[in-house]
Image (cartoon, rainbow, N blue to C red):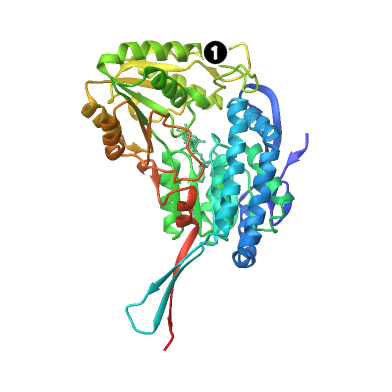
Amino acid sequence: MDLRKNLIAGEWLAGADAVENRSPSDVTDLVGLYARADAEQVDRAVMAARAALPAWAGASPQVRADLLDRVGLRLAERKEELGRVLAREEGKTLAEAIGEVGRAAQVFRFFAGEAIRVTGDAVASVRADVDVDVTREPVGVVGLITPWNFPIAIPAWKIAPALCYGNTVVCKPADLTPASAHLLAEILHEAGAPAGVFNLVMGTGAIVGNALVEHPEVDAISFTGSVPVGRALAVRAASGLKKVQLEMGGKNPMVVMEDADLDVAVAACLNGAFFSTGQRCTASSRLIVCDPIYDEFAERLAAAATSAKVGDALDPATAIGPVVSAKQLNSNLEYVALAASEGAEVIGGERLNEEREGYYQRPALFLNATNDMRTSREEIFGPCASLIRAHDFDEALALANDTEFGLSAGICTSSLAYARNFKRHAQAGMVMVNLPTAGVDYHVPFGGRKGSSYGSREQGRYAAEFYTTVKTAYSFAG
Ligand SMILES: NC(=O)C1=CN([C@@H]2O[C@H](COP(=O)(O)OP(=O)(O)OC[C@H]3O[C@@H](n4cnc5c(N)ncnc54)[C@H](OP(=O)(O)O)[C@@H]3O)[C@@H](O)[C@H]2O)C=CC1
Ligand SMILES: O=C(O)CCC(=O)C(=O)O
């Protein structure tokens, strides 16, 4: 099998090491063999990005727009093929995977438009005959560190704005899922990204990620992943005076009020808690349900969750694919056991299809959970959700906000007053009414509060805050 290589200074280079990328649906399915870089190759990639920066930062916005547009078009044209690879390597269903590639395409096309819409401000000076203008310039060389759960969309929503605003990029995808990012790198290369403007260095966080964070020629780091890695990385990056942006975990609440349309609420919770195998930082992992409908809602959601077909990501009948890895599956199973020992009534959650060499788990509901249980406070990142009882709206809102996280929060209700109140008072970066907490648009800000995020928002026009630096210029015209 051919070795898939790193892209450094416009050349494909083998690494110090290589990793077998295997499908979590069936570990006998080898997706590919991927190079792993070392610190020396990271240095070459960063220096290539540094060398390419002046020309790319100075390129006409049309040149940047055209590159991003070509990448978006090619992603859209090839979304079935790329979706299949993504489903094989990550385990989300084929429909979800194709949808994710489509989303990556839209992100590139959105930022193609943004590249020619970069504006500044002409401001009246407080002094006579002085003009002031405020413009945006690229930050410089940006290091992008991405997780396994959205292996093409997350790289896309970091790479596209970085290139749009004139930065050069060194991207390190998750070691578990390098195939999607590698295909994206091939498309960027074929679409004409100049040598050094975009570099891909695959490998582990401990070696490649660490070398990127420590490198003095990296001006900014955008990271998505776990809280402990994000926190430690931010401290190190900040000590090197790098700009930092972190998107981390969530323990996202979905409140179900007594006046909710239960069909809508069950569908939103099924999707939010269990689709993509619950492996979304926006997953609804705390379902806070009002007393009068708690039992009926629990029964209906349990029926829907336990009957959802768990299976091979490529099987069109599958609703929920496998867990991404043996490590993640073991961690999920430990949380299921913990929920029982904490006093919750556990429905589902067991390992499935043990005869197959994949990591299958039935969705788990933790009934009669309380918000102080560890399973209600820690991000599990699997198909597990706690059902917590609330007496009324005020208690539900208080429970929703009682978490160290603040990424997404939802409410199902038919009351305008509840919806309005929740939108106003939920301590989260994103609020959903009668919609799952997960599954966001690609052109509006994405990010959270409290322990979920750090730095400015990703996606949409707000991405300019991270990927540009502002210059204020004064001129005397007297
Ligand atoms: N918010 C989100 O979207 C996500 C949250 N998570 C949470 O994180 C948990 C663990 O998942 P995991 O993939 O291990 O998350 P990590 O935070 O370990 O990984 C995210 C990225 O950071 C890299 N990384 C790891 N250590 C370092 C380091 N010291 N310096 C620089 N980069 C580093 C990883 O590399 P490597 O490839 O070697 O792992 C990966 O590319 C999940 O169970 C879930 O709770 C996970 C994925 C996404
Ligand atoms: O819910 C979504 O659409 C995005 C989720 C996400 O970005 C994540 O889980 O990392």
Farthest residue in the bottom direction? 478
In this view, 137 is above or below 231 = below
The structure residue drawn at horizontal position 45% and vertical position 42%, both measured from the top left corner, is 229
**Whole-percent x, y for residue 118 in the image:** 52, 61
Left or right of 298? Residue 69 is right
In-front residue for pair 423/302: 423
Q: Which residue matches tag 1?
A: 352
The quadrant where residue 202 appears: top right
Badge 1 density bin: few <14, some 14–19, many ≥20, Cα 10 Å: some
Q: Residue at x 58, y 39 (%)?
A: 103
> Left or right of 290: which side holds 445?
right
| Count of residue discs | 1
- The quarter holding residue 76 reads top right
Mark 1 CB within 8 Å of ligand 1 = no
Residue at (45% x, 65% y) in the render: 470
Quick check: can you spot residue 48?
no
* Placement of the C terminus among the 4 image quadrants: bottom left
Residue type beneath disc 1: Leu
